[in-house]
Amino acid sequence: MTQTLSISERKIGFWLAVLLALLGFVMAASARHGVMAAHGFMALALGFGLVFVLGGALFDPEPQQDRSSRYYDAPTRFGIVMTLVWAMIGMGVGVWVAGLLYLPEATPPWPWTSFGRLRPVHTTGIIFGFGGNALIATSFHVLQRTSRARLADNISPWFVLLGFNLFCLWAVTGYMMGSTQSKEYAEAEWYADLWLVVVWVTYFALYIRTLARRAEPHIYVANWYYLAFILVVAMLHIVNNLALPVRWTTAESFPVWSGVQDAMVQWWYGHNAVAFFLTSGFLGMLYYFLPVRSGRPIWSYRLSIVSFWGIVFFYIWVGSHHLHYTALPYWAQTLGMTFSVILLVPSWASAGNAIATLNGAWHKVRDDATLRFMFVAAVFYGLSTFEGSFLAIRPVNSLSHYTDWTVGHVHSGTLGWVAMIVFGAIYTLVPQLSGREAMASPRAVEWHFWLAVGGTLVYVVSMWNAGITQGLMWRAYDENGALSYSFVQSVEAMAPYYLLRTIGGAMFLAGTVICVWNCRATMRTTGGEVTDRPLAPQPAE
Amino acid sequence: MLKLHYNLEKVSMGLVAAIIFAASIGGIVEIAPLFTIDETVELPDDLRPHTPLELAGREIYIREGCYACHSQMVRSLADELDRYGPYSLASESAYNHPMLWGSKRTGPDLARLGGKYSDDWHVQHLIDPRSVVPASIMPAYPWLDRPLDTGLLRDSLATLARLGVPYDEAMIQAASADAQAQSNPDSDGAEGVIERYGEGVAIRDFDGDTSMLSELDAVVAYLQSLGTLTDTPYEVLAEGGQ
Ligand code: HEM
């Protein structure tokens, strides 16, 4: 980090680090004990660490002179490393909690290892830690390449990445210590939420400022998706997390929403976290890395416009399909269902556009595991959006809701689509950032690919079976008109599927471990400089 | 159209504005009308908010992530009515910040749980679920026998009152004393709990150990209160059946 910053930038960074340490100190000192104090200490430690790193480098030589005529890739590198770290944490915890559902006796007697506390560690760690870092890291890369401009400044990318990771750390450690808002995918405490707003505004400003420097008249499609991701996530995050702290010096707070309103706001947020965190940004990734890797332009520009606006407009409506047959007013449920079905059109338009792009490059898909990751991602994107629209239909939902079918659906999207496209992007980026032609071990990429595909299939198929079995058992009546099965019988029936799911998850995790090893080996043997340069002269700022 | 978009792609702030506009409509249409619900859905007269002890139990329920496996929302489907009881009404969770409707039933729905089992059963089940239900995959919570921290209760009630939950000044002032008294029927404060929260409140020693107010007391008090805060769902169902 420090070698790429000028001395005056290091000074600014130094003072920002001092501020962070101070913020941590104030938090710890005013809370005195409990979760908020622990989080204050974490901020203090991070601030101190940065003070040392930056302070120690204050008198080092200036970076090379032609810095501004190059892309700024150091933050992307760091972001990818963090992506991999969180992948291991998030998936590791995923496999662990999957195992606990098969063998609950294995829970150690410490509260923080309990299923209910670790499940949000899995979801937050994987969605925000793994997914979020991947999005930020690739967005910096894509933004610069498609704008042919260097990032607008050198400090805010670091602020965004470090700040975002501090948020993730606060969130997951908070749950383990027993502090949570209990709103799915928005469990973090109120001060962590406020912190994320600051980080996010900086991110948005950086994005817009860099776009303003672009040497291309048009903003490329990938950037539309990244922009939608940044903007709408901000909107969702702020509205859903409005809360009143019990005291300014404790982590506890109460959301301002209650009852039905809370349920509607929560699932408006929850489903659009899927849409704008787990879909829109990753479509941006797809629209950049797929053409780059396959060497073919996007099949249809027109279709990309239609599907983009379709996704932005229709997705927002669908959250209420999480609340069928509940106390939510019927009209709102119906709207959610209707728009969910319509949503299939722009979703398949995107998936189809991606797959059609590969026309004429199928031999590459066969030979190149990296491109195959992206191809499989597009296929699973198509499959899980189809499944999603299907599950949103009221009578289908009456069977699937509350069961493991939902979990199967979620993971066909997250393992099959999100994780696959991230791996495709990582295998494209890491060699490039390291100035190499290819990954250290192409064979390992091949292994990773088959473990990931196999793991996903085992996971998803076992959860389909689990969910449908559960749903059918719950509603089965015998000839006397009494319920056929007690709840516990349906629990017993799940055991084989939960075991299979754990095995599928472990395969997927094994693939990730191979990926981490391979990336490390590639990054360590850096071949030289990144070769591509912004082509046009930089406009003066 | 295409031409228009062609130009839009050149203006970053234009794109930003268009995205915000397109992404706002759905949310506004679906969420805004729900805020008139306070007028359209009548709150039942007998609906009471949770007592401080139950509220403390609810916070523990949230802390331990019970909501990750248990829903509290009976859907209006025949098998759910037979399995759990009357379907849930919007008004029942009107005082719940946040709602705990849940999204996954690894364990059964708990919306109608109050009174289904004895306090002893719950204590035993929480400490070691497999000792009462051998096939259970619910985690054990042996640490819940530790003392309950009531330090935050007063401010919690005050915060909820600011958000519109009907806790009056007397309830707020007495919050932590009421938590103690609810699990201690012989104490002087027990009368006060009834006076403030009504006859329907269960006043007894929930965990079978009078020497200390434990987290178990709070959780069991909360579990036993589920579905008992108003009788309306039963009345609505009976009327519908006629
Ligand atoms: C190593 C692979 C993985 C394993 C073994 C795994 C396992 C699990 C388990 C056991 C649950 C809880 C299900 C339940 O409560 O019954 C879960 C939930 C969830 N996981 Fe994963 N997971 C993995 C990867 C991922 C990835 C890569 C993502 C996202 C990018 C993800 C996102 C989620 C989400 C959003 C939920 C919540 C689902 C819901 O509320 O219905 N998981 N996962």
Image: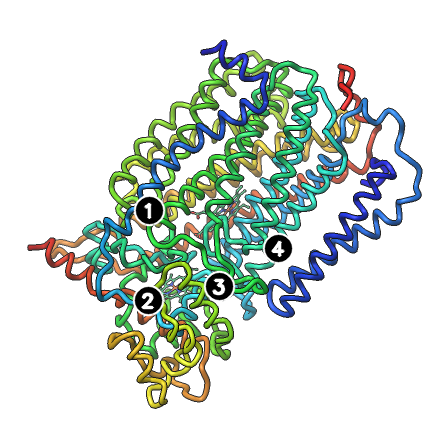
Question: For the residue carrying disc 1, how many other residues have a C-alpha within 10 Å: few (<14), some (14-19), or many (20+)?
Answer: few
Callout 1 touching callout 3 (CB < 8 Å): no
Label 4: which secondary element = helix
Q: Which mark is residue A34?
A: none
Instruction: Indicate the chain on which mark 4 is placed.
Output: A
First reached walking from the N terminus: tag 1 or tag 2:
1
Viewport quadrant of the N terminus of chain A:
top right
The answer to whether tags 1 and 3 share a subunit is yes
Q: How many marks?
A: 4
Q: Amino acid at mark 3?
A: Arg
- Which-is-in-front pick, marks 1 and 2? 1
Callout 1 touching callout 2 (CB < 8 Å): no
Give how far across and how far down residue B62 sits, in percent.
Answer: 45, 62
Kindly report the distance in space between the C-alpha atoms of the residues bearing marks 4 and 2: 32 Å
Circle 4 is placed at which residue position? A170
Instruction: Indicate the chain on which mark 2 is placed.
Output: B
Give how far across and how far down residue A144 sits, in percent.
Answer: 69, 25
- Which-is-in-front pick, marks 2 and 3? 2
Callout 4 touching callout 1 (CB < 8 Å): no
Circle 2 is placed at which residue position? B49
Kindly report the distance in space between the C-alpha atoms of the residues bearing marks 4 and 1: 33 Å
Q: Amino acid at mark 4?
A: Trp
The answer to whether tags 4 and 2 share a subunit is no
Circle 1 is placed at which residue position? B35
Kindly report the distance in space between the C-alpha atoms of the residues bearing marks 1 and 3: 28 Å
Q: Residue at x 38, y 30 (%)?
A: A386
Q: Residue at x 61, y 35 (%)?
A: A135
Q: Residue at x 33, y 82 (%)?
A: B192
Q: Which mark is residue B63?
A: 3
Viewport quadrant of the C terminus of chain A:
top right
User: Which of the two residues, A51 or B75, is positioned nearer the viewer here?
Assistant: A51
Q: Amino acid at mark 1?
A: Phe
